[in-house]
Amino acid sequence: MNDHSTNFKTPRPRVKDKRGAILRASLKVFAEGGVNGVPMPVVAEAAGVGTGTIYRYFESKDVLVNELFREEKLALSKHLYSDLDRCTPPREQFSIVWQRLIDFAREQPDSFRFIELQDHRPYLDDASRALERKILAPSLAHYRSMQKKGIYRRDIRPEVLMALVWGAYVNLIKAERDGYLTLTQGDIHAARDASWNLCTA
Amino acid sequence: MNDHSTNFKTPRPRVKDKRGAILRASLKVFAEGGVNGVPMPVVAEAAGVGTGTIYRYFESKDVLVNELFREEKLALSKHLYSDLDRCTPPREQFSIVWQRLIDFAREQPDSFRFIELQDHRPYLDDASRALERKILAPSLAHYRSMQKKGIYRRDIRPEVLMALVWGAYVNLIKAERDGYLTLTQGDIHAARDASWNLCTA
Amino acid sequence: MNDHSTNFKTPRPRVKDKRGAILRASLKVFAEGGVNGVPMPVVAEAAGVGTGTIYRYFESKDVLVNELFREEKLALSKHLYSDLDRCTPPREQFSIVWQRLIDFAREQPDSFRFIELQDHRPYLDDASRALERKILAPSLAHYRSMQKKGIYRRDIRPEVLMALVWGAYVNLIKAERDGYLTLTQGDIHAARDASWNLCTA
Amino acid sequence: MNDHSTNFKTPRPRVKDKRGAILRASLKVFAEGGVNGVPMPVVAEAAGVGTGTIYRYFESKDVLVNELFREEKLALSKHLYSDLDRCTPPREQFSIVWQRLIDFAREQPDSFRFIELQDHRPYLDDASRALERKILAPSLAHYRSMQKKGIYRRDIRPEVLMALVWGAYVNLIKAERDGYLTLTQGDIHAARDASWNLCTA
DNA sequence: GATGAATGAGATTTCATTCAT
DNA sequence: TATGAATGAAATCTCATTCAT
């Protein structure tokens, strides 16, 4: 190969934050192919690093999946609840969070998809499961307080109400993603109002 | 190793309907371990057949998963909609279907779990996806007709409404299964009423 | 490849006792290249089986190495001590065992080499170490009884004496194997006599 | 991960003689874990240098192992034979060397262990093997001269005798190291005397 | 037809070595 | 010169599928 051969591998683009690059790439390829469907060399290539490099930052595929899961859960949590003005009227506040949910699914479709993957459940460790619960807590408190204030219906436990609303949202997004429907802004508002009625009627 | 003579495996119980046995066993082990997490020999053992036998009835693991998916989807559909009296008052009809949903999740937890696995999505073929849609159609028609009759709210497309209700139900069951809550009959009725309000308020 | 290509892999020779074939092949290749120096596919090829087949018989490389170690230790022990006539005069008995040692090294050079490999020490599990000790026990008893009878010198503990004799033997064989000398039958007899003097003088 | 600033590694102690440090560290970690069991970054850390630095002093792991082997062999040789008074009576001289052997094993256990590792045999190059022989030569000459003087038995070739004595010694030490016995000073003297009888009886 | 031992492609993970800093 | 993060070839091990019995 001392000739002017064109048999080059395209050189890997330089990356600085490898850990971040690996997480971002993992999110993308796992969201698309599922955790089990994507071999590590594919993650590596997507991240623009060597296969071995992944193992400098994450002990194993399991650990990678768990750390990714926690990062994305936290990011979602922040996205939804940061800078919420406690004084905003309830219905408006509901609208804001609902819109943030929609925005999240639109802007971070991989994150949404990865979080909702069931595929990684067997991988999840105690820390990840603990985080899931921890993130739920403030949300639950919110439902409870809204019930106390007489705004949300009181004939239903807050855990149950929350599960219903979250499930409705998640499935709405999945339905669109899986091609069962295409959401207009009108649909989104209608869904929001219906969900509000779920909580209050 | 001169004790081979006494080293019996418990003999496998004779099975007549091997295809059925394989499907039932698959449902069970896939529900528990995920499609990717369960090797074919494990399926075979659970079914009480030889590994090779599975391949006489199903061309590949993919095909098995797809056929199983379709069988379970059909079973669910039948369970929900068979013998529904069109004359029953709407609210009561809603109650009946809701209770059937709950019963299904309780009586066929493996089926519920398997159907909701995301794990198999990459496996699903066109036939399976087509069936999914086909099964949705009557349900969708029902929503539409209820809107026409002025019983369900008309400010929302029936596809969207259906996605919301189905999502709420599925997540309620998942929340219980994953240990986030334990459903009393009171919870179930309350959830049903809230869902009714989602449709009608 | 629908032409008369000669690009055949030579078909693998049929083997019946795969477990045995794997052990025999392992012994050979490990003796030659060291446990760490030989990848599993090479073991597989030497055994005339597929790589995966090894894992049907041995849980891991570790387990394979340990089982091999124990089998060879036992074989050596049997070779040395079976059918020893307790009534043979001591010196003659010593001669017989010494000759058996030599024969073992000559006839089973791979076994000798493998057993004396240090390379596998980090692999050895408790069962293997326990077996080592167990095999030593009757030998030790022999030394002790010879001391009691006043045949072997009594100014030295039997464990120590045994260690010296065994070491002398092993190193004699190693020296030949590593090309430091070539043993004539005369050398062997002389070494035997010197070792006898080690025990008795 | 915003706490990087406090995430210090304890700074590596400055080292001047890096080559020596690498050799000393190699000896230690190889003796413990075997040549194959210890990755280069572990050697580097033990030496207090960067991984890459090793490759400035040693072309490859092979070369490192060989140089280390030769250094240790030479050190052993010096330890055993330096300042030996040719006029000391034979038996006393034997005692002195024997004691030096014991001292070496006691004071430089890593060196002893490393030299006796079989693990590195496949690594050894011609230079190392040549050195082994060269070091043996004076020892061999000694045996020969003792035979000529009629002190050592003449019915055995000096190479063979030497192999026996060295093997007896090495195995004595190994037996202790591997926990088969604990050597008292009495044991050591008895072993010495038995070895003397091996040579002279 | 039924079996399950056998297979080998492919997955995860390790580590000797390099090279930008 | 010294470094250690990065690399990818190679090791161990898994599992969907086949095929001799």
Image (cartoon, coloured by chain):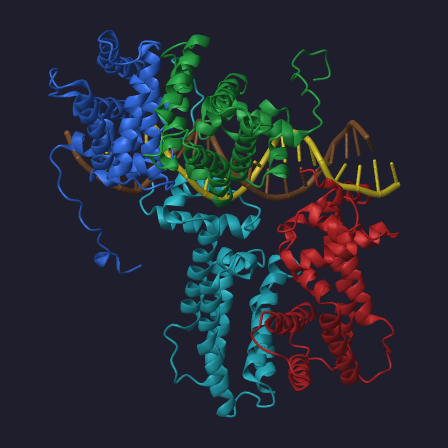
Chain colours: A green, B blue, C cyan, D red, E brown, F yellow
Q: Position of residue B72 (x, y in %)?
A: 23, 26
Q: Quadrant of the C terminus of chain D?
A: bottom right
Relative side of A185 to B49, left or right: right
Which residue shows up at 27% across the image and 41% down it? B184
- Between C51 and A169, the residue placed more toward the observer is A169
Q: Looking at the picture, tell me which residue is in the foreground, C43 or B145.
A: B145
> Residue D43 appears at what percent x and percent y?
72, 50
Above or below: residue C25 compared with residue A47? below
| Residue A62 rendering spot, x and y as whole percentages | 50, 39
Quarter the N terminus of chain D occupies: top right
Give the x, y percent position of residue C150: 52, 92
Q: Is residue C21 above or below residue A97?
A: below
Nearest the eye: A55 or C32: A55
Residue lying farthest to the front in this orientation: A150
Residue displayed at 42% across by 24% down: C8
Asked whether residue B53 appears in the rendered view, the answer is no
Total labels drawn: 0
Quarter occupied by residue C177: bottom right
Q: Quadrant of residue C47?
A: top left
The reply to whether residue A83 is visible in this rendering is yes
Q: Is residue D168 left or right of residue A127?
A: right
Nearer to me, B61 or A181:
A181
